[in-house]
Amino acid sequence: MKQHLITFILGFLMMISTTDIIISQTVSYPDDPRSFIVEKLVDLTHIQAELRIDAQTKNVEATSTIRFSDLRKGVDSVVFFCPKFRIDALTVDGKTSEFNQAGDYLIIKRNGQVNTLNDHEIVIKYSVTAPNEMYFVGWDDPSAIMRKQIWAHRPAGWLPYAPDRLTMDFRITFDGRFKVFSNGVRESVIDNQDGSKTWHYYLDKEHPFFSTALVIGDYKWLNLETNSGVPVELWYYPEREGWLDATYPYMLQMFDFCEKEFGVAYPYSAYKQAPVADYLFGGMETTTSTVFGDFMHIDGRAFWERNYINVNVHELIHNWFGNDISHLRDKDVWLTESFATYYAKRFEKEIFGDDYYQWERQKELERVLKASETDHYPVGSSRGGTERWYPKGSLVLDMLRDELGDDNFQKAINWYLTKHRQSEVWTPDLEKAIFESTGRSMSWFFDQWIYRGGEPHYRIQYEDNGPGLLVKIEQIQEINDLMPAFKAKLNFELGYADGSRRLFSVYNHQKEQLFVIPKEMELLYILFDPGDRLLKKVTFERPIHNRFDQLLNTPLMIDRYKALVELREVPLDQKREVLYIAYKMGQFHLVKSEILSQLAADTAVQSIEIFRQALLDTDVLVRKGALNVVNATQKRLLKEIETCLTDTSYTNIILAMNALNNINPEQTDNYLRKTKNERGFPGLNVRIVWLEQAVRNGATKYKKELVHYATRSYDFRTRINALEAIMRLNLYNPEVESAIQDAINHWNFKLRAAGQKAYQHFEGNRKT
């Protein structure tokens, strides 16, 4: 009777606490200085360009013909971004036109055509040297080791540019020994008498002008065709033909996945992609013609260093989300990037399974919560940045799908993509598409997860009162006008002694809330948010046995991993036996690696045996998990660690070399002999570690080779690896100084940062 009374009272209190009290209030949102749509005076519809490029002088000679129509009367000029352009001739509708150049902009007078709304044509003949956004790789390498390329993933700097959507027709003339890659369908390749070739590409459907690509280099390509008939070209370096399978696995499955998931066919007539050297990012969704960093043009052994699968499908998805449908404002970037990130993760789930998908979600969550330590910009903000547009937006779409259900989510996305084909959209278009296709109003969801920032931090406490659990939920994050308390359906999983599980849900939108979860039998554990679906931080106050039972009894890998994370601060003697059981039960590397990390300092026989098993595991990532934390405690495992010197993973070879060098330094010469022929990838990673250890061990003759890898003869990853080793060795001479200065002046921001770090390191040493 007493328990029933407690339940009734708590239920009554909860009813009162969750009753909405209507009061007048002011609604506030974070300021976004780029939330408005920029005015548009003319509509660009087509660009035709003829380009001739000289690699030695970095000069581009071109004639660009731009068609447009007026959107209003009285437009007396047209403006293009044309930095460093030398204009040789310019006409509007066939007549010579006045123009002036103001800084980076070209302002073209309309010559009396200001009162017509008909189509017009501007023809600009120009040249530009060392153009912005066009990168010349390898042409200035005196040793001729670095591969020679020219590439651009944006048009601003070598084409007259203004933001718009248009069709394209390019003819690019270059040395006939090289291949040329651009947007659209390759119409022809013509041999010229001077030994050059002219490559003709035509893109017949509109796309965002900024998604324009140009690549020139020594390539071959593999022709494929998707099940829906789309021709695909996979470009590769001729000497890496044997690496095609490792670089481009699942290519056709990616098309099948997208077309099935979206219910919309691939929007364009062809698709191709090419690796490029010294690339700034992972890849770029240049329409129909993706470019990506050649550090992902890999062999089989580098597959687990960083493979191209996620970036590959991410950039393919952009042909729907970003190119066919492009975002209207900077604050709508998430409509492009969040969807590509989300669906790439879903594709990997289909290929690698649910545990892999949960691992990806865990990495996204860690990035999001780390970013929140700095600021709370929303996903739908021009200030959101990488961590909000990519991982947070991806997790938000997971939650949106959970709210709508699979069928309604897919129906809404199909409606959105179909309704807005070949157009620009903003966030309200997606919200409206959901409503129109499903009848569901998700305004509260967009308000909370898109327009506002931050994440909830739940503190969960409970007491077992026999028939039920008295649970208290608190939102302990900062709550204010810009970030009110979050609204969410909170799920609790109860695991019982007979192996059964029950789900209990409660709606929460308050700072504090009390409720009762009824018990049906003997309880093993209570789990908050099974599957870790809600984007949040959690402080869950519960006894240690509850965490043990969660680790050993929950069906989902991510819930077992979360229990392990909660056990990190528990003394080893209180959890050792449970960790042993969990390791034997575990299959996925994330769980096994976390257990290895918690057992790393243990000298117990069984802990050493678990490390032995891990070092010989068939899963490369389990071996990596062991090598990451192995130490002198495992000196009895030298033989097993030594087997990793010939590992299929380059990273594992490096980890084994470093571990053995620390644990058994008297055998370093022997280990160097065993690994002397390994080069590694990317960035000659194994070779550079080998050279560093050899120099430390007295082989000074290898200093010259190490320094050479820091010069412009090598790709940026190799140069960064070499500079880091040089700093650790405190190796400084005129050649090092020259390599550092060259890195500081490089256009690749990652290499530039490494050069600045090396400069500061040696400058600091000189001062001391």
Image: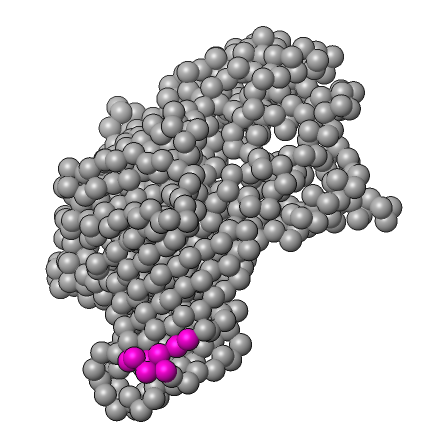
**Residue reaching furthest to the front:** 193
At a point 56% along the width and 20% down the height, the residue shown is: 678
- The reply, left or right, for residue 758 in relation to residue 415 is right
Question: In the rendering, at what x and y percent does residue 13 appear?
Answer: 31, 59
Quarter of the figure with the N terminus = top left
Q: In the image, what residue occupies the spot 70% across and 15% down? A: 668
Please check the rendered image and state whether residue 359 is part of the magenta-colored stretch, yes or no.
no
Say if residue 440 shows up in the picture.
Answer: no
Query: How many marks are shown on the rendered structure?
Result: 0
Q: Position of residue 18 (x, y in %)?
A: 29, 62
**Image quarter of residue 292:** top left
Which stretch did the figure color magenta? 89-96
* Residue 90 magenta: yes
Where residue 737 appears, as percent x and y from the top left, is: 75, 44
Judge whether 214 appears above or below 622 on screen. Answer: below
Instruction: Residue at 57%, 30% (x, y): give it.
Output: 684
Visible residue check, residue 687: yes
Residue 670 lies, with reference to residue 694, above or below; the image says above
